[in-house]
């Protein structure tokens, strides 16, 4: 008989099968993910969770029979006698369908892990091309520790490791300890003549052995080893710019927030480290924390250029464009003071766009409003003009919560597809 | 027999020496007291997660990759995480050596129970039952699965994942009709099977000559000259093993596709005995673990407390809810099998008048285990029940027979109950419930229109008015047509020979397979 301990075997043997299943059900699962994410707070989007998909393409058909006359033998007769007729009810007694049995339901429920969920959620989305170029090029060299080596520069000697090895060697070879020798010497100092010769010999042997086995041997010495490795710029900063003047309602702010959250989730997938900078502005701009950003009261006129200037200053002081991928998303209801257009346009094209990977402008509106169907807002027409002149801007209008995801999806769609659809 | 030597374990904790001691103690008893004959045992300790993994590949330690296993896994996992279902205490594999998986969370008592149950009960049944001896090759199965896994992976590499997946989908849909139901010329030898596939591949490689492709094919034989009789004989018709038929006769399958069908067919065949012996298999294992555990307790090798823990698990396992109980979902094979085997023991040792009348061959012969060993070796569920279900047990379980005829508007008729008039009828009907001949629809290949459009003609012999579920039937036939690559028709015929329904399906090309 053998007993085998399999507990340490690598688990999730069926991971591959699970991936195959998800791949096959991709379209279905994607829909389910979208539907399930609609009902959630965007904050919870990152959590995995249960989704249910229609069984249509996923079932495994078999020849099954149904109907016809049936005979069954059952246990637990209490009062029936031969010849009794039992009335049929909708649910036949004793044949209750088993709850949750796959083929009796038209939907199939299962749990997606967090990663699977977000992957599917953000499937088909891609960073703008610009960003990828940057990512590939901007490689710095870094060094990191990589264990120990037997050779190296004296500056890199690892004392603790060396002493540890030396100690092990000394113990293994039974090098006499200094205390042992001192003890013998003390004994030698006051002993009678008879024992002296024996002790002397013993002491000499011990001393010789201690000399033969050095305290630290060259073979004990270890050096810390370092390796250099290329380091892609794996950090991103995301600027959230928002107009908080009186004309922005809670609804509009909520729309903007949802967009920012999506952008955050998306960037988080691509970069190891993502920082967020919140800049709100009325006629002057300030950097604030998240809570103030969304909920802090503010009033005043509207000068978009102030926010752009603030962003530029922050970039210059804290986020060197060579080290950071810079993303910016601006949300506004489109109001801007007429005289500001020129300055904002220049700031944007000359300062902000050259250093950003991506600049998105999101114009938010009331869910029942139709104002910007009739007339483009001042900011919209300004950006539209810049875009016509070739500035790499992305801009969309959003009015309903349900439009946020499609708009986001639209902005980050894989380029290949867009090119194909574009004439 | 080794003299009893104190407790095997104390409390709930166990370690590997404990398992070894338990196994050795069980082995002594199974040999000396029960006379079992088992494959060598291999006991593997696994975690809950690994148990879930094992579920999704039908309990086998290795299996080829397919999305449907991932689906089952996702399903099982969702249920397990919600706490709707617990996990099995063990899984046992019909192989030599016989592999039993034990969950690490089991207590020492549970491990003893599981070792007695799986490593001796199931193991003896696998080794001795005629169905397993006839249809499965315990020595070869693991190697064959290994080969299958490798072969499928290799096909995916060579022919694309999609083409392989479609072929396997189709084969899985027909799996229940890929079984030889009657013993054929030779016993299945999976090792030889694996060698054969390897040799064929080698031969293909060595004999490969691209020139053959360019040789013009001669004028086709006049197909009209083949008369029906000869054709049917050549194709081995009628044939109820659909996968076998496709593997041998489907005109446009590639060799690797035939090999895939063959793999699915062999695996279906391997599981065929298990589906026919659920009651007996679990009954045997339960009877054996009960005997072994009781014996260990009597020898003083299991403490009273642990024995009570065992009894509680055992009672849960053999619990049979009544038909009107919420928990009822058919007969519990553990309960029925165990009750029948205990009943046989009683009939052999201590029969009453009724037993002598019903079971003259075994009543009072005295050696219960000899009788049981014979039963374990030579019966399957259907024959076991129709031979050994006693009136006493029918009364005890209060069995009754319902006859549900949709044409009868008044309701469902109670056809027989546990009384003198009903015993034989109940026994016959219950046995029939376990008869594979009645469980699977009877579908066979009738003919192929070789002279015309190569249509494959199938027939479903309708029994008791039970027709095929239409949606599923269409989907399965679509798979079948894709493999056959020409039209497929299926007629449903009742006993009088009148056609109830006809399906015709056209093939859809398999991706990249053509």
Image: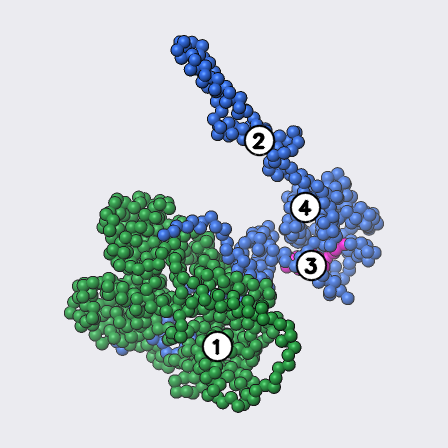
Chain colours: A blue, B green
Q: Nearer the viewer, mark 2 or mark 3?
A: 2
Give the answer, above or below, for where B180 lies relative to A199.
below
Give the spatial CA distance, label 2 vs label 3. 60 Å
- Residue contact at pointers 2 and 1, CB within 8 angstroms: no
Give the spatial CA distance, label 1 vs label 4. 59 Å
Residue topped by disc 1: B245
Question: Would residue B308 be found to the left or right of residue B256 on screen?
Answer: left
Give the spatial CA distance, label 2 vs label 1. 72 Å
Using the image, name the chain to which the residue with label 1 belongs.
B
Local crowd size for mark 4, using a 10 Å CA cut-off: few (<14), some (14–19), many (≥20)? some
Question: Quadrant location of residue B126?
Answer: bottom left
Instruction: Answer yes or no: is residue B270 visible.
Output: yes
Question: Would residue B144 be found to the left or right of residue A278 on screen?
Answer: left
Give whichever of B51, B370 is nearer the camera. B370
Residue topped by disc 2: A219
Q: Secondary structure at mark 1?
A: helix
Question: Quadrant location of residue B100?
Answer: bottom left
The stretch of residues the image draws in magenta is A393-415
Q: Residue furthest left?
A: B353
Q: Position of residue B244 (x, y in %)?
A: 47, 75
Local crowd size for mark 3, using a 10 Å CA cut-off: few (<14), some (14–19), many (≥20)? some
Using the image, name the chain to which the residue with label 2 belongs.
A
Give the spatial CA distance, label 4 vs label 3. 21 Å
Q: Position of residue A196 (x, y in %)?
A: 42, 12
Are the residues under badges 4 and 3 in a single subunit? yes
Instruction: Answer yes or no: is residue A310 visible.
Output: no
Asked if the stretch drawn in magenta spans residue A398, the answer is yes
* Residue at x 43%, y 84% (from the top left corner): B493
Give the number of callouts: 4
The numbered disc on residue B365 is none
Q: Secondary structure at mark 4?
A: loop
């Amino acid at each position: 008989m053998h007993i085998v301990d399999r507990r340490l075997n690598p688990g999730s043997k069926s991971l591959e099968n699970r991936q195959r299943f998800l791949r096959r059900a991709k379209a279905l699962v994607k829909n389910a993910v979208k539907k399930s994410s609609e009902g959630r707070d965007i904050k919870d989007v990152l959590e995995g969770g249960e989704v249910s998909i229609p069984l249509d393409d996923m079932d495994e058909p078999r020849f099954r029979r149904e109907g016809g006359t049936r005979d069954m033998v059952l246990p637990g007769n209490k009062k029936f006698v031969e010849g009794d007729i039992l009335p049929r009810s909708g649910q036949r007694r004793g044949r209750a369908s088993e709850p949750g049995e796959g083929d009796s339901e038209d939907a199939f429920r299962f749990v997606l892990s967090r990663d699977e969920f977000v992957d599917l959620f953000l499937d088909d989305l891609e960073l703008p091309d610009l960003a990828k170029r940057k990512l590939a090029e901007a490689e710095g060299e870094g060094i990191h520790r990589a264990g120990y080596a037997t050779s190296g520069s004296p500056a890199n000697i690892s004392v603790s490791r060396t002493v540890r090895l030396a100690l092990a060697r000394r113990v293994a070879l039974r090098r006499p300890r200094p205390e042992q020798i001192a003890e013998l010497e003390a004994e030698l100092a006051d002993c009678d003549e008879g024992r002296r010769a024996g002790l002397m010999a013993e002491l000499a042997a011990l001393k010789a052995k201690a000399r033969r086995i050095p305290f630290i041997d060259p073979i004990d010495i270890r050096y810390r080893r370092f390796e250099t490795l290329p380091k892609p710029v794996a950090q991103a900063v995301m600027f959230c710019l928002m107009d908080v003047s009186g004309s922005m309602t809670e609804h509009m702010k909520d729309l903007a927030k949802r967009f920012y959250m999506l952008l955050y989730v998306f960037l988080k997938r691509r970069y190891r480290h993502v920082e967020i900078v919140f800049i709100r502005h009325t006629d002057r701009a300030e950097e604030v924390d998240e809570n103030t950003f969304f909920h802090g009261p503010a009033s005043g006129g509207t000068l978009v250029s102030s926010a752009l200037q603030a962003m530029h200053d922050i970039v210059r002081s804290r986020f060197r464009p060579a080290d950071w991928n810079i993303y910016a998303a601006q949300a506004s209801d489109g109001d801007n003071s007429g005289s500001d257009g020129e300055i904002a346009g220049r700031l944007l094209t000359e300062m902000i766009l050259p250093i950003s990977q991506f600049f998105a402008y999101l114009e938010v509106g009331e869910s029942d409003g139709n104002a910007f169907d009739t007339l483009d807002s001042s900011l919209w027409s300004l950006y539209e003009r810049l875009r016509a002149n070739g500035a790499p801007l992305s801009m969309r209008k959003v009015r309903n919560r349900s439009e946020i995801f499609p708009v986001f999806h639209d902005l980050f769609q894989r380029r290949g597809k867009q090119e194909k659809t574009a004439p | 027999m080794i003299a009893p030597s104190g407790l095997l374990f104390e409390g709930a904790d166990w370690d590997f020496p404990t398992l070894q001691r338990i196994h050795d103690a069980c082995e002594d008893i199974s040999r000396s007291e029960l006379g079992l004959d088992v494959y060598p045992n291999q006991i593997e300790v696994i975690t809950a997660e690994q148990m879930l993994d094992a579920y999704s590949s039908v309990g086998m330690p290795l299996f080829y990759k397919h999305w449907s296993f991932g689906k089952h896994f996702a399903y099982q996992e969702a249920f397990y995480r919600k706490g709707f279902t617990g996990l099995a205490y063990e899984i046992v594999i019909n192989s030599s050596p016989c592999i039993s998986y034990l969950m690490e969370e089991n207590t020492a008592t549970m491990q003893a129970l599981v070792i007695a149950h799986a490593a001796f009960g199931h193991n003896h049944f696998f080794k001795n039952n005629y169905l397993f001896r006839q249809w499965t090759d315990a020595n070869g199965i693991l190697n064959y699965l290994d080969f299958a896994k490798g072969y499928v992976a290799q096909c995916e590499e060579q022919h694309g994942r999609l083409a392989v997946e479609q072929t396997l989908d189709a084969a899985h849909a027909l799996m229940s009709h890929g079984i030889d139901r009657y013993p054929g010329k030779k016993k299945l030898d999976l090792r030889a099977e694996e060698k054969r596939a390897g040799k064929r591949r080698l031969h293909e490689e060595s004999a490969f000559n691209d020139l053959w492709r360019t040789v013009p094919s001669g004028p086709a034989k006049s197909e009209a000259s083949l008369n029906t009789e000869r054709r049917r004989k050549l194709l081995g018709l009628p044939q109820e093993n659909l996968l076998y038929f496709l593997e041998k006769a489907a005109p446009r399958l590639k060799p690797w596709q035939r090999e895939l069908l063959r793999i699915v067919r062999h695996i279906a065949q391997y599981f065929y005995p298990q589906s026919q012996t659920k009651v007996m298999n679990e009954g045997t294992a339960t009877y054996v673990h009960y005997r072994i555990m009781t014996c260990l307790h009597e020898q003083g090798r299991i403490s009273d407390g642990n024995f009570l823990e065992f009894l509680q698990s055992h009672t849960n396992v053999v619990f049979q809810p009544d038909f009107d109980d919420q928990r009822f979902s058919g007969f519990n094979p553990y309960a029925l099998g165990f009750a029948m085997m205990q009943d046989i023991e009683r009939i052999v040792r201590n029969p009453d008048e009724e037993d002598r009348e019903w079971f003259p061959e075994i009543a009072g012969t005295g050696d219960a285990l000899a009788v049981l060993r014979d039963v374990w070796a030579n019966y399957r569920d259907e024959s076991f029940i129709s031979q050994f279900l006693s009136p006493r047990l029918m009364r005890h379980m209060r069995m009754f027979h319902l006859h549900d005829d949709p044409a009868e508007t008044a309701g469902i008729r109670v056809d027989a109950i546990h009384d003198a008039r009903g015993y034989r009828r109940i026994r016959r009907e219950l046995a029939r419930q376990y008869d594979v001949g009645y469980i699977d629809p009877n579908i066979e290949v009738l003919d192929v229109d070789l002279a015309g459009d190569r249509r494959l003609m199938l027939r479903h012999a309708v029994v008791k008015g039970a027709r095929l579920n239409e949606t599923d039937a269409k989907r399965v036939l679509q798979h079948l047509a894709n493999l056959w690559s020409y039209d497929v028709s299926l007629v449903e015929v009742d006993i009088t020979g009148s056609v109830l329904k006809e399906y015709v399906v056209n093939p859809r090309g398999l991706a990249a397979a053509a």
